[in-house]
Amino acid sequence: MNKTPILEKNINQNSKNRKYERIGNKMQDYEIVMGLEIHAELSTKTKIFCSCPTEFGGEPNSHTCPICMAMPGTLPVLNEKVVEYAVKAGLATNCEISRDSKNDRKNYFYPDLPKAYQISQFDKPLCENGYVEIEDDNGNPKKIRLTRIHIEEDAGKLNHNEFGGGSLVDLNRAGVPLIEIVSEPDIRSSGEAERYLRKIKSILEYIEVSDCKMQEGSLRADVNVSVRKKGATEYGTRTEMKNMNSFKSIVRAIEYEANRQIDVIEDGGKIEQETLRWDDVSGKTFSMRDKEDAQDYRYFPDPDLVAIRLNEEYIQKIKNDLPELPESRKARYIEQYGLSEKDARLITSSKYLSDLFDKTQEICKNPKITANWILSDISKILNEKELEPDKIPFTAEQLAKMIILIENGTISSSIGKKVIVELFEKPEDPEEIVKKNGWIQISDENAIKAVVQKVLENNPQSVTDYKAGKDKALGYLVGQAMKETKGKANPQMLNKLFVEELKK
Amino acid sequence: MENIIDLTVHELIEKLEKKEIKVTDITKAYIDRINEKENDVQAFVTTTCEEAMKKSEEIQKKIDKGEKLGNFAGIPIGIKDNMCTKGVRTTCSSKMLENFISPYDATVVEKLNNEEIISLGKLNMDEFAMGASTEYSYFKKTRNPWNLNTVPGGSSGGSASAVAAKLVPWALGSDTGGSIRQPASFCGVVGLKPTYGLVSRYGLVAFASSLDQIGPITKNVQDSAILLNIIAGHDERDTTCENRQKEDYTKALINDVKGMKIGVPKEYFGEGINPEVKQKLEQAIEKYKELGAEIEEFSLDIAEYALAAYYIIACAEASSNLGRFDGIRYGYRTNKFNSLKDIYRNSRSEGFGDEVKRRIILGTYVLSSGYYDAYYKKAQQVRTLVRKEFDKAFEKYDVLLTPTSPTVAFEIGTRSDNPLEMYLADICTVSVNIGGLPGISVPCGVDSNGMPIGMQLIGNRFCENKIIRVAYTYEQNTDFREKYKPEFKK
């Protein structure tokens, strides 16, 4: 009937294949070079320069005052908590903390920026010269250097066509404190970029300065990408992708953009220095502005704010109060609880998982089993549902109770798996879940014996196999018995009774 | 009995205490005067006479009931139109803010309200305080009551003119490069610019944040000390406003300068100074000698660079401070637009006057990458040097004495087309702002045309008490106010 779409599809398919093939051949000749600028909203109660709440959401412009609306004559007053949080972030990422710092104005016009300048930091950031450690693609440790961390205010939000046409400004977010974490161009693959971002996210979560909710935009990254022939010492021209806010799209965007750049170079073209927007739907980058309309922000020290001077005592106090960071938690898990390096690393990669682990094992007193549940069933469901760990709906108490129910024989571990699924659906007391579903383990010897008898009668072939030395047959029989009891039979007793019966 | 409007505020307070007059009499007298003379001087952008009368009646009722009120309850005042007043428009004499009503009160306005001081209205100024003649107001050209063909000075021209014409007993002005002192000098009244950081800037629509200060414009030195007492003090909403022990400036009203050291920087008396101005200043110096002060001439050679540094710093800060007037949230918005860029460009092109645009362009230029080091950074270095020079001077002297302006008030229209000449008129006053110092202008005579001449006394940072004392002594031993009155010459 209508053949055009098919035709188009074929053409697309062809060009895609061709492109892929060529890049496939050339990709290995190139190296990707990346630096990230990560913006994290700080979880202070009030905004950076006024006392409005920082809470996400709320009616448009309900979290505003004359100061964050930039009414004429208003003045900013720096929230000291913001400095404290930024210093914390600096110390947790091995930065040097500036004793003498200041705020600068970054001037540009945009309707979400009510003062027509953003108060930021230009040449004297609070933190400089830090690093964090990640793993490279071969699993070896690698340092990513941080150029700086500075404080600044967030802008408002524009709503396009949401309220009956036109564009409207919502200044609830204007003045929410941010830190910008700038890395050196040390990142060499999309995998490294993801691990670096995850590392920063987990550190900020550990020190409790940001809730790092990417879907709410409280953690977002600008990615600078360039490519160069392997072995080259000069950097290639870079492009910048703005405001990326999911791990998945960052990885996709980097891969797309690096391939695009290699493509351009292989075609004999030149990379233009430009700012790009990643479109998740089409999976492509689009130019927002090129070097020609690069803005001159006319930075200068904000005369409304006094210099930020920090003394040793202040910095030392923050250092002393710094909570346990992922590295030391990992060491503790290995040493104290005997977890494997890999398990310890996986759990500590998220503060939420790690806190869940700590609390759960404290109640159930079984760290290894706790780790197993977190890394197997719970992680599996998180992956399936594409959820971040902070979206786990149940509490440590509930998880611990489930583990205790297994240990005291109330339920079997296969029922435990079902309980986890239930907990994800509707978190409540595992005991209730078990009762409601009639999942209590059958540990009555006579009842189990009856099941064993029945299964043996129904599976004479397996009995023969077992007696002929095929040990695997026992597993099958136990499985059948489990099926028969809907997983409720006590597995140890089942095993024991089968062996006894088969020996007869 | 003397006419109410001829009295100073401290005299009004005495009469109120003795129950010789009522607060309603005072407000009534000033409203009558406004009705009589405002047409000639055009000092107000907005008058609030009705509200003022109502307020004074309420206060009078409280007094009649025997309620204990503050000393200043019921005293009227005029406020420069760049200080935010809740409920009454704050225009900065700009088309941009023609209909802007602030949702909050400036800290100084709060302080006046706490004292139950009654505002008679908002006073005219150069647009966004940029100018030295009040000719750059979008609304009207304020006249100098001594000669209605001349300017009142600026940018606080409305404030100085209103005090001189007795439309208000006292007023608040703001001073970024001389905007209180120069119009005070032109209008034959007293104007005090406090030390940077003494008075809160919260609610003062910013021109140049590192230079702006609010201060009193009054009939005499005593009233300035009183008004300074009311407005000075730490404010948590302005971190550049210093947290210091509160001082009573009326304690500095001491009629004695014996043994005080007054430095006279010779650079301020050189080229460009009107000979009659120079002569009156020399007479004032003689007077101080007579009164027992030690006078010494010295060199403050950095002064000539202060003017250039001032225009760079002030314009740079202004270019950024005025960015918020973009036609988006409040203020003037063009109706000719097809794009966001149009809204910005046309709103700002149509909403700002030429002088404001000139300074925004200058400021944008000096902050641009590639020019920053040559202009803004250099200007900040000059600023540091100016401060050091002043520090050195104040190791030796209690106060410094200079003219407030090299000339008397000039005729309307003679300079407004020549920005550079207008800028040069600020030469005597800007270094005080660059240094963050307090300065007071006191009348010290008139020229042959009967136009007032002002003397500027400069003090070290937070040494308002010294300039008040030296100014007060001069005033007590001379007779400017008795001898000369503005004549509303047409």
Image (cartoon, rainbow, N blue to C red):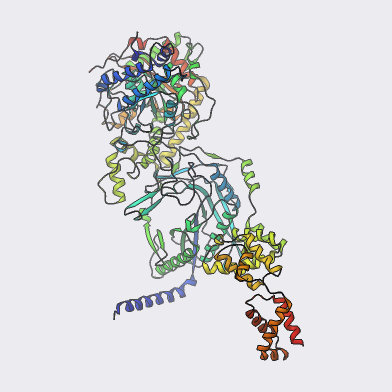
Along the horizontal axis of the image, is B278 left or right of B234? Answer: left
Q: Quadrant of the N terminus of chain B?
A: top left
Where is residue A192? Give x, y as percent: 54, 64
Q: Quadrant of residue B208?
A: top left
- Residue A276 vs A496, above or below: the answer is above
- Give the camera-side residue of A2 and B303: A2
- Give the camera-side residue of B419 and A85: A85
Q: Kindly identify the residue that appears in the image at 40 percent across and 13 percent down.
A: B284
Along the horizontal axis of the image, is A78 left or right of B319? Answer: right
Residue A341 makes an appearance in the image: no
- Residue B305 vs B28, above or below: the answer is below
Where is residue A400? Give x, y as percent: 66, 62
What is the number of callouts on the image? 0
- Residue A234 vs B18, above or below: the answer is below
Where is residue A16? Give x, y as percent: 39, 75
Residue A72 makes an appearance in the image: yes
